[in-house]
Image: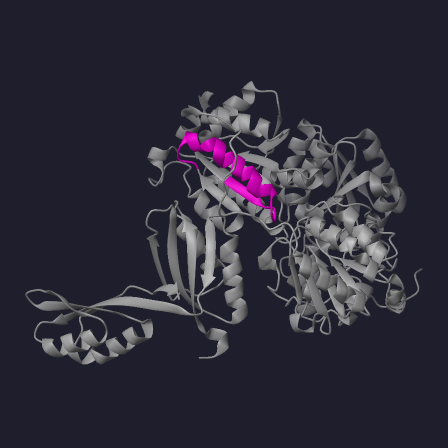
């Protein structure tokens, strides 16, 4: 991974008000920055929400992203993560005819398990670092996953 | 007190000390206009197009240093105003623009004259609001004015649905603002300032790079003192014209694409750039990798995002220019103005090698002469607006500006049609000064309907139309870079500008000689009425010198040397 396109994780604390998400995403699209993933949820017992944005760019680009985000009026704080705990969740739907004990064993290696069983399918959940989620999805390819959904990353600075 | 949303708008404007509002009524804003009718605390100037209302508010703001206010209706009223918002955003002009919106119950139904106004204005305003409850209106309007004028100034848009303007709620404007997430940093870091002053003291060829932020910060006096105390030469950006007086020995001139040879060479040779409220725009820097290549950079700006955006700053200082420059002044004793004697000599030599000038080699008037002549005749007594194009650059190059806020032009966005309405706003703010708008035969037609506003409201703007029957700046690029294929830039088919002015009740002149021009300008100033002075100028005159787009500042296309007739 060259420095010009390094992966970065940025957390943004914003006032939880109408259209604040559009302000953030408009800034990214208007200035030509990437969003790899984006998660948002209110911070409990406060008027703020927390966004975790996975993006990419050179040091200078990330510095600009951070500054431009901070310029938005409802933005309280922007962190570019350096030393963080980062997790992402994935849900995967498999045919019930696949080898379920194998699937369950793999899921366990990625902090997960089968969480739902239907007539024809099972749903497995894993939760791990985004890179390990990539590995998991590679590992379960052979079990014919029907549908995959990833949550996008959340991160906390250590 | 319990009043309607519409009354709250009026009360808030009065509380903010607004004396002039530019606008255009329509369905969704009618409740507010009804309250405007009933009051006599501020004047409303009805422009003939919403774009012009916003440009007029910009001109008013730039000339008066106050927040400009414009009011428009929903849908097309708002979309017409967007160019003005974008223009103010690019040039950091504090505005509050209030638009009507369809009633809340109709939002999202594709109602008549409905458009997602805040969705559109989000990317061209400093901030915006959709008001959903009249109870929020006092706070929102107070925040809007505060956000517009504080920090790096800019336009704030407030969109108010019609039913909210009818709603009754409590109005109390004396509430303290609680903007936890917005706290502009105005005081520079003292340690950084100290380091910057040491860098200045150690530099051999330092150069002030003065930007429009100085004017926004009302810091021209302090900057003049700093320049004179340190004896360090200065270049101005287009937006900073008038920061130093034209006759200041330390002012080298304007830099950039159409800057002077000396200014651009000084920037190329300096070993320390002292950027004050400037943002290293591409029209200023030319090729970035060659810009001030051997120099360290001190960058003072109130907007942290402007610092190290394009050129890395060795000494970044976030703060209001006025505060920071005052702090710099207090530490000036370590700087010895004698040290830069040789550097000043070098710059004088640059200037003597290729002075900013033009040749009187045409049967027709030269546009530069016209600008210079107005400068000789009116000088400090006029405020100067421009439209966008060749005439704009000639004005920036050749007018003898002597004070900040004398020059009002659309720099960042480059909006043709800006000049005339802006000049009306300037006149409304500074009635004691003559308001001149230098314009071209292309630009003037983009807001010529404002003749009606200017005549009705007795805003005697003198529009000097430098007529070369071309969309001149584009024609110049076509001549230079497109092998003279003048695609769609020949404006030979034109209205009769004299009759056009007269049709609206203004006065028109068509002049071809120096004597005729002097007579027309004298007459227009004396009569004090709205005027068009159409000046027939050389068709193929180019704006020179010029740094071709993407070229290096030291690689300029220069005026050919020859003896003037």
Residue B486 visible, this orientation: no
Residue B474 falls within the magenta-colored stretch? no
Relative depth, front residue between B464 and B496: B464
- Residue depicted at 16% across the width and 76% down the height: A144
Q: Is residue B137 magenta?
A: yes
At x 67%, y 27%, the residue is: B456
- Residue extent of the magenta highlight: B131-157
Q: Is residue B35 left or right of residue B560?
A: left
Q: Position of residue B121 (x, y in %)?
A: 49, 46
Q: Residue at x 70, y 37 (%)?
A: B64
In which quarter of the view is residue A103 placed? Answer: bottom left
In the picture, measured across the screen, residue B122 lies left or right of residue A51, that is right
B167 w.r.t. B295: above or below: above
**Eyeballing the image, is A40 above or below A134?**
above
| Residue A110 picture location, percent across and down | 23, 74
Place of residue B277 in the rendered image (x, y in percent of width and height, measured from the top left): 68, 55
How is this picture coloured? Answer: one colour
């Amino acid at each position: 991974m060259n420095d010009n396109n390094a992966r970065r994780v940025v957390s943004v604390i914003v006032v939880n008000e109408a259209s604040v998400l559009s302000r953030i995403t408009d800034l990214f699209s208007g200035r030509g920055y990437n969003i790899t993933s984006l998660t948002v949820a209110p911070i409990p017992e406060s008027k703020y929400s927390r966004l975790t944005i996975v993006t990419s760019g050179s040091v200078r680009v990330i510095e600009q992203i951070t500054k431009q985000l901070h310029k938005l009026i409802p933005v309280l704080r922007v962190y570019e993560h350096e030393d963080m705990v980062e997790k992402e969740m994935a849900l995967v739907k498999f045919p019930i005819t696949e080898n379920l004990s194998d699937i369950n064993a793999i899921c366990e290696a990625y902090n997960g398990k089968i969480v739902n069983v239907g007539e024809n399918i099972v749903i497995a959940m894993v939760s791990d670092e985004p890179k390990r989620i990539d590995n998991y999805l590679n590992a379960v390819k052979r079990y014919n996953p029907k549908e995959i959904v990833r949550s996008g990353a959340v991160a906390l600075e250590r | 007190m319990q009043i309607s949303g519409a009354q709250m708008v009026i009360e808030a404007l009065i509380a903010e000390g607004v004396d002039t509002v530019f606008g255009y009524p329509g369905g969704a804003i009618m409740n507010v206009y009804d309250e405007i009718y009933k009051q006599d605390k501020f004047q409303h100037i009805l422009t003939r197009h919403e774009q012009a209302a916003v440009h007029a508010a910009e001109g008013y703001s730039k000339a008066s240093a106050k927040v400009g206010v414009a009011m428009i209706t929903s849908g097309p009223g708002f979309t017409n105003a967007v160019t003005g918002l974008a223009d103010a955003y690019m040039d950091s002009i504090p505005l509050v623009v209030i638009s009507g919106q369809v009633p809340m119950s109709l939002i999202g139904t594709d109602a008549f004259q409905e458009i997602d106004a805040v969705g559109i204005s989000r990317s061209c305003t400093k901030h915006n609001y959709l008001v959903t409850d009249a109870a929020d209106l006092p706070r929102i309007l107070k925040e809007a004015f505060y956000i517009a004028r504080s920090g790096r100034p800019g336009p704030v848009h407030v969109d108010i649905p019609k039913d909210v303007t009818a709603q009754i709620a409590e109005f109390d404007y004396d509430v303290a603002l609680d903007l936890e997430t917005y706290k502009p940093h105005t005081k520079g870091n003292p340690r950084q300032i100290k380091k910057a002053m040491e860098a200045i003291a150690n530099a051999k060829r330092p150069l002030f790079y003065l930007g429009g932020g100085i004017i926004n910060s009302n810091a021209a006096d302090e900057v003049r003192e700093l320049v004179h105390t340190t004896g360090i030469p200065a270049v101005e950006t287009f937006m900073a014209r008038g920061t130093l007086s034209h006759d200041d020995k330390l002012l080298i001139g304007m830099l950039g694409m159409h800057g002077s040879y000396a200014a651009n060479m000084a920037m190329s040779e300096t070993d320390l750039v002292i950027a004050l409220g400037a943002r290293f725009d591409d029209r200023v820097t030319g090729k970035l990798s060659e810009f001030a290549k051997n120099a360290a950079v001190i960058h003072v700006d109130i907007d942290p995002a402007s610092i190290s955006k394009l050129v890395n700053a060795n000494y970044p200082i976030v703060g209001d220019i006025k505060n920071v420059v005052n702090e710099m002044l207090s530490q000036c004793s370590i700087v010895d103005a004698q040290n830069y004697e040789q550097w000043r000599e070098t710059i004088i030599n640059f200037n003597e090698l290729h002075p900013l000038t033009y040749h009187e080699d045409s049967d027709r008037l030269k546009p530069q002469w016209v600008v210079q002549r107005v400068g000789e005749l009116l000088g400090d007594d006029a405020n100067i607006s421009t439209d966008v194009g060749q005439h704009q650059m000639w004005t920036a190059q050749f007018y003898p500006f002597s004070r900040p806020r004398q020059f009002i032009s659309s720099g960042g966005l480059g909006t043709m049609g800006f000049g005339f309405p802006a000049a009306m706003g300037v006149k409304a703010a500074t009635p004691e000064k003559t308001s001149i708008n230098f314009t071209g035969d292309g630009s003037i037609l983009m807001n010529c309907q404002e003749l009606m506003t200017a005549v009705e409201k007795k805003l005697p703007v003198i529009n000097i139309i430098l007529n070369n029957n071309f969309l001149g700046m584009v024609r110049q690029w076509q001549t230079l870079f497109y092998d003279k294929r003048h695609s769609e830039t020949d404006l030979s088919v034109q209205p009769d500008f004299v009759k056009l002015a007269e049709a609206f009740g203004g006065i028109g002149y068509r002049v071809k000689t120096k004597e005729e021009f002097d007579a027309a300008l004298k007459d227009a100033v004396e009569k004090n009425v709205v005027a068009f002075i159409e000046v027939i100028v050389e068709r193929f005159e180019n704006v020179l010198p010029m740094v071709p787009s993407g070229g290096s500042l030291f690689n300029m296309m220069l005026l050919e040397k020859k003896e003037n007739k």
